[in-house]
């Protein structure tokens, strides 16, 4: 079944104004990209939003309109948008991850732990997933953040200053000493992920109002203007929100008249 028909019958709370409206209300464009995110405090959600914001002007110019649904409440959504810059008008919240379940997305590792609460069980399973259990590709992606990736674009401009506590503020030019420029340098992605982790841990109760869904994974769906499903990706684990993590939006190139440029603007 084309998931688009599910969207037409689904209503969720919009972060910008708190209204509960159909997910496809006013959604137009030659290509409609739906990002079904896990918990809004999840690494994947924050990192995916960073990539969208990085390439938003290109997406708009090429007729790709974006909407996202994340697990959390409106307070989590507002904090997420303030931090990431993702527009609240394009973000909807789903506290229990009901849409994820309806779409049949991977719920994450579900090791039964008798005698503990659902939230405690979910946190234990999440920690196991961080170690790669029930989460294929996670450890390799973590290491890629430290080792660098010559096939991926440079992530931090030389004149950009990144604050990732407990590290002191770092200017992007520092990463040139780790290997050069024009590609993802060693520690560059790991620094951005550290910044996200510091943000979430500092506001954990806001980002994760109900921890029972922290293992739930997300998915990506692309439709044409008439509702035909062109592409989908179903996450299999942590840090697996794309089939090409070095350039997560690369899948769009096969449908667009020109390729998206993931490189840092000069």
Image (cartoon, rainbow, N blue to C red):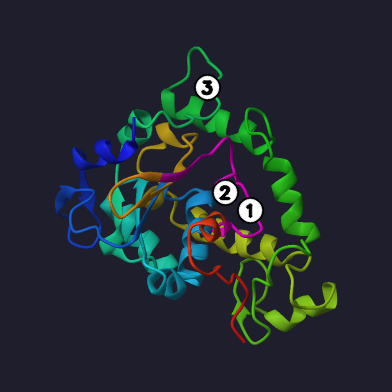
Q: Point out the image quarter for the N terminus.
A: top left
Is residue 250 or residue 88 the one in the foreground? 250
Sequence-wise first label, 3 or 1: 3
Q: Which residues are magenta?
A: 230-250
Q: CA distance from mark 2 to mark 1?
A: 5 Å
Residue at the image position 41 percent from the left and 31 percent from the top? 212
Location of residue 81 (image quadrant): bottom left
Q: How many marks?
A: 3
2 or 3: tag closer to the N-terminus = 3
| Helix, strand or loop for the magenta stretch, by majority | loop
Q: Which residue is mark 1?
A: 245
For image coordinates 69% across by 36% down, the residue present is 131
Give the answer, above or below, for where 28 lies relative to 110: below
Q: Residues within 10 Å of mark 3 (few under 14, many from 20)?
A: some
**Front disc: 3 or 1:** 1
| Residue visible at 30% across and 55% down in the picture | 225
Q: Which mark is residue 110?
A: 3
Q: Magenta segment: does it hold 140?
A: no
The percent position of residue 168, horizontal first and vertical second, equals 67, 75
Look at mark 2 in the image and give the residue it sits on.
242
């Amino acid at each position: 079944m084309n998931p688009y028909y599910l969207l037409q019958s689904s209503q969720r709370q919009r972060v910008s104004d708190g209204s509960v409206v159909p997910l496809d209300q006013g959604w137009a464009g030659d290509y409609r990209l739906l990002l079904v995110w896990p918990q809004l405090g999840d690494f994947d959600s924050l990192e995916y939003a960073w990539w969208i914001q990085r390439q938003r002007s290109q997406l708009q110019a090429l007729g790709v309109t974006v909407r996202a649904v994340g697990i959390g409440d409106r307070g989590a959504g507002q904090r997420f948008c303030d931090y990431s810059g993702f527009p609240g008008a394009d973000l909807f919240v789903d506290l229990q991850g009901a849409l994820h379940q309806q779409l049949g997305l991977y719920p994450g590792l579900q090791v039964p732990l008798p005698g503990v609460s659902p939230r405690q069980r979910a946190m234990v399973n999440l920690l196991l997933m961080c170690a790669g259990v029930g989460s294929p590709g996670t450890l390799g992606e973590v290491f890629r953040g430290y080792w660098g990736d010559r096939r991926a674009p440079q992530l931090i401009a030389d004149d950009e200053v990144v604050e990732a506590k407990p590290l002191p503020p770092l200017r992007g030019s520092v990463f040139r000493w780790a290997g050069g420029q024009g590609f993802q340098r060693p520690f560059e992605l790991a620094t951005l992920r550290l910044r996200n982790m510091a943000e979430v841990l500092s506001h954990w109760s806001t980002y994760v109002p109900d921890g029972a869904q922290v293992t739930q994974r997300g998915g990506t769906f692309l439709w044409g203007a008439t509702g035909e499903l062109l592409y989908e990706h179903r996450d299999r684990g942590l840090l697996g929100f794309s089939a090409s993590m070095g350039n997560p939006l690369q899948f769009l190139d096969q449908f667009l008249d020109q390729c998206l440029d993931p490189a840092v603007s000069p």
